[in-house]
Image (spheres, grey):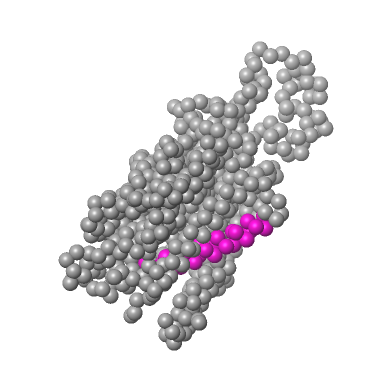
Amino acid sequence: MFNRSHLLLVLVLIAAALLTFYKIPIASSQGLTLVSAAVEGDLPLTDPDSALWNQATAVDVPLSAQNVTKPFLLESKIKSLTARTIQNGSQIAFLVTWADDTQNDSLVRVQDFRDSVALQFPLAEGQPFFCMGQQGGNVNLWLWKADWQADINARQDMDTQYSNMYVDQYPFADPAKGIQAGVADYTDPNYVPAMASGNLFASPLHASPIEDLIAGGFGSLTAQAADNQNVQGFGAWEAGKWRVIFSRDLASSETDDVTFVPGKTYSVAFAVWDGANGERNGQKSTSQWVNLQFGSAPQPVGVKEQVEPQKPWWQTTQVITLFMFGVLAVLFIVGAFIYSRLPE
Amino acid sequence: MKRYPVFLSWLVGSALVDWLVTRTLARSAIFMPKSPPVILVYQGLGLLGQLAATVTGLLVLAFLGWIAWRGLRMGGEVVLPTAFASLVVLSLIFLVFPPSGWLAVSYHMILVAVIVLVGWRAFSWVDSNSKKTASLLVALTLLVSELYQVIPALYEALRLPGPTFFSLILFNAGELLLLLSTIALWWAHGRPAAWRVWLVASLPALAFIAMRLANPAMTGIIAIWSTGLTLYLPWPGYALGLWLTAVTVLKSLKQSDLAAWVILLLAAGGYAPQLSTHAFLGIVALWLLLPAAPQPALDRPVYLESVPTSNDLVLEEL
């Protein structure tokens, strides 16, 4: 016989189904939260010593060896990193620091591997798998590379590592350059097709030490087109510590880029590679997802419109949530009425 | 006698499904090759897990609300019921406004206050020393786990640059306390047990040992996803803890001891949980360790020794 217990169970299941269908989480986050502090003025895009960084609370993010998919990292050398972030209403910047005894910023020798750090943001609602996302849950990655940073500071080539090397000639370079021809001196793109096609790895000059990528699961990491590389960065190693700054406009018109809207909550995950430990590709130390929130700040006029097209009021998260609460309240009242008329 | 709402058993059931399906089985899928049928199965499991997680979220809020209502109705106390009610209200507020700043700190501080108050009562109202120790260790584990999470929120609210250097120490101390809790709970509720109970209870521990020896890295990942434990202590300690926990659960279930549900709720909540729902499961478990409140006519509290039966699981009359 249908009694009060059954009715309660049915009501709970209906309410849970509605909340699940409309993706309204009943639980709030307890875990690590990185708050992007709102600051006035320009962001210190190349200055990790700026006092502005002290306006943001740093968060220690634990890292663990990537052992989910091959190639595994058996033992993580970098156990944690420290992250903080600031934003001024139009740009956001992250300062990531971690201890690393060695500065590995050259890939000229084949036996060398570089130090790197990456930030990862989900492109859809929710949190896909923290390591490279998953099918149907793409992630946007910002990958800072120590060798690209070194190239920007002073380009490295074979003669940087092997100063006594000798080359007979570069047959397809501008003859006027002689044996000192660099990659950029190759005038005929047929002989440097990777560079001619815009492959960032082949580019002799890096505009940024950060590569803007997208992934949707293991083995799917893809660089965004050269024209869409819009993340800036700066990194410096000093006294056994890397300090790397990532920066980008809050808004991005590219579908493969995460767009930040102040007031909303996001997720960010981190990965670090220690070149001295032979870490590359999947051999890295990774974090779980960390909540990313925005501190309150007066937004410059027009930024809201620039960041995200204004939605009709009835499509805002708050209104939808309140509507769902209304539905649940009606459900509760009707249920209570039936409940009072049912046998125990 | 202490009576519980009918949905306590549903809460335990849905919490277990949420834990075992969503946070354990579904996440371990990353180690498996996925053919289309397997993907279909996991999509189904994912949906089931989401539904279970939402049911758990609703029920645990309802249970906290019920504790608050019950406390106020019994009269004589205001602080604890108000704290429970505040947790429910704040959880509802956080559906619309994400927890941040002082609101987040307030939420965490209320959680800390609830753990301290309930933990103290569980400690002081219980007669037996073994149960006192078990209650104290469970409360301390929850407290340290919560402090680990409140300190970064406090730093953020105060706009201190941080980071907190003792966070890791707190986290590790909590994990050690959790292991000690498993021993204390076994000492208080799991002794003596028949050899058959010991034998059956050894199966999860043996599975853990086999997995740990075969693939320590994978074991560590599944452990942290499933339970929040980092396994930083020597692994035989975790194997022993798992064994003793299983013994306690089996024996308590057999004897209708409420400790079985307490342990299952604590396990489903996990250590240093990432979601408020899971933190509340720990609070409910701690509250279930409380004996019935002292009645004016009684000199000392009556400890509820039995898992509520279907007859007991009725809503209290208004």
Residue B181 or residue A92, whichever sits in front: B181
Placement of A85 over or under A184, stated as above or below = below
Left or right: B28 with respect to B290? Answer: right
Picture coordinates of residue B126, whole percent (x, y): 24, 58
Picture coordinates of residue B114, whole percent (x, y): 30, 60
The quarter of the image holding the C terminus of chain A is bottom left
The answer to if A106 sits in the magenta stretch is: no
Picture coordinates of residue A301, whole percent (x, y): 51, 60
Instruction: Determine the residue positioned at 51% across, 75% down.
Output: A10
Residue A207 or residue B24, whichever sits in front: B24
Residue A111 or residue A153, whichever sits in front: A111
* Start-end of magenta stretch: B39-64
The overriding secondary structure of the stretch rendered in magenta is helix
Instruction: Determine the residue positioned at 25% across, 69% down.
Output: B78
Total numbered labels: 0
Q: Residue furthest bottom?
A: A341
State the image quarter where residue A127 is shown: bottom right
Placement of A57 over or under B288, stated as above or below = above
Instruction: Determine the residue positioned at 39% across, 51% down.
Output: B194
Picture coordinates of residue B179, whole percent (x, y): 37, 45
Residue B126 visible within the image = yes
Residue A296 visible within the image = no
Instruction: Determine the residue positioned at 60% across, 54% down.
Output: A123
